[in-house]
Amino acid sequence: RGLPSLSRCAERAPEPARRAREVALGRVDDTHMSTDADLHLSDVHLRADCSDAGCDLPCETVFPFAEAADAASSSDDAHEPTAAVDEDGDLLCARRKRRKLATPGRGRLRICHALATPLSDVGLQVWRGALLLCDHLFARESAQLLDGAVVLDLGAGCGLTSAAACLAGARAVFCTDAHTASLRNSANNADANGVGGRVRVRRLDWSAVDVWPSPSEGEFGWSSSDLQALRGATVLLAADCVYDDGMTSALVALMSRVLPALGPSAVAFVSLERRVNFCLEGMCARAPAAEHFHRELEAQRGLLVGSLVAPDGVPQRFEYERAPTLELWRVRAACASAEQGASERRVRSENSAEPVSGDILVRGASSLTPRS
């Protein structure tokens, strides 16, 4: 509902995508559609080319990414466009040119995906938060963290971040989701990108596990060797999993159990997009899903410590709009964050004559506040 004008891909796509395009153009009356019938289309796929998908889903998109020397810092494009007026006083906006970050022959990830899905199937699309998280995985500071690491990808959807983690140096990635269609698509995408041997696609329902999943048989089940390897994971990923309050609560609760169990070296990276809606409560524009994540993280302050990753420090390697509504969070177990903070303060105090106070970053519902 309220989708922008879609490209020719929607005309080639199945009926749901075509209907979404008709609704967006006002050609179809959408007032009697039920909530379950509402269609959602990722901004990433507005210009998707759906020809020759070569998979069970209607689209296949190639995501090129720049090599390290070619990656652009997000601050390169952070300037505001200049504005002027013409002789009639009309505003003239100098639009920022879209920069090509990668060229053919460099890094490429090929992903099969769907278009314009109901909310229950949005994991079959690629969203901007996943591309921001992929940028971070390829950042220089992540190289040592991922080198030879075991990674747990939560709510992996199409498996883009799982494949990117392998290309960034991970030894093994547990690509998990609760939906069979997403799991099968992730497995196909891992094979298509040559990382099928390192990506283990497994079923994981956050609300149905305490800390570790139980051994299970059948398609996407967990073996004893899987569970043994999982206990050695040091990196958790969650891209675009913050849009349903119940699922968000389950995600934060799972991190509060898993991160302390994995030990002080474990860290989670959560990317999300603040989707702003006009809310009758308060009669104002808010991002309720993101606010719920902030509150849940604050409620787990005794177990988890979260901090925002500055986007200016994450070079952009993939081609997408790095919107200011995107957030990337680094989450650690509280005990691990305290040990790391004490170590960093000791290093700073040894290199400085000034005493260093202990700053603890505490995230509230809407602000990041230093406390002494």
Image (tube, grey):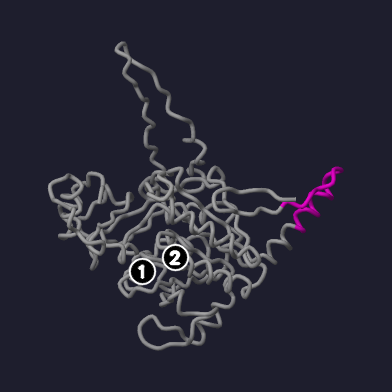
Number of other residues with Cα within 10 Å of mark 2, as a class: few under 14, some 14 to 19, many 20 or more: many
Distance Cα–Cα, label 2 vs label 1: 9 Å
- Please give the count of numbered marks on the rendered protein: 2
SS of the residue at dot 2? Answer: helix
Q: What's the magenta region?
A: 342-359
Name the residue located 61 percent from the left edge and 49 percent from the top edge: 368
Query: What is the three-letter code of the residue carrying label 1?
Result: Ser
- Residue 241 lies left or right of residue 37; in this view the side is right
Residue 60 inside the magenta-drawn segment? no
**Residue tagged 1:** 186
- Residue 116 lies left or right of residue 243; in this view the side is left
The residue most toward the top is: 87
Query: What is the three-letter code of the residue carrying label 2?
Result: Ser
* Residue 52 x %, y %: 20, 59
Number of other residues with Cα within 10 Å of mark 1, as a class: few under 14, some 14 to 19, many 20 or more: many
SS of the residue at dot 1? Answer: helix
Taking depth in this image into account, of 268 and 206 the one nearest to the observer is 206
Name the residue located 55 percent from the left edge and 71 percent from the top edge: 150
* Residue 363 x %, y %: 60, 54
Name the residue located 30 percent from the left edge and 72 percent from the top edge: 181
Q: Which of the labelled discs sits on residue 9, or is there none?
A: none
Marked residue nearer the N-terminal end (2 or 1): 2
As drawn, 78 above or below 243: above
Q: Which of the labelled discs sits on residue 162, or is there none?
A: 2
* Residue 317 x %, y %: 45, 48
* Residue 27 x %, y %: 12, 47
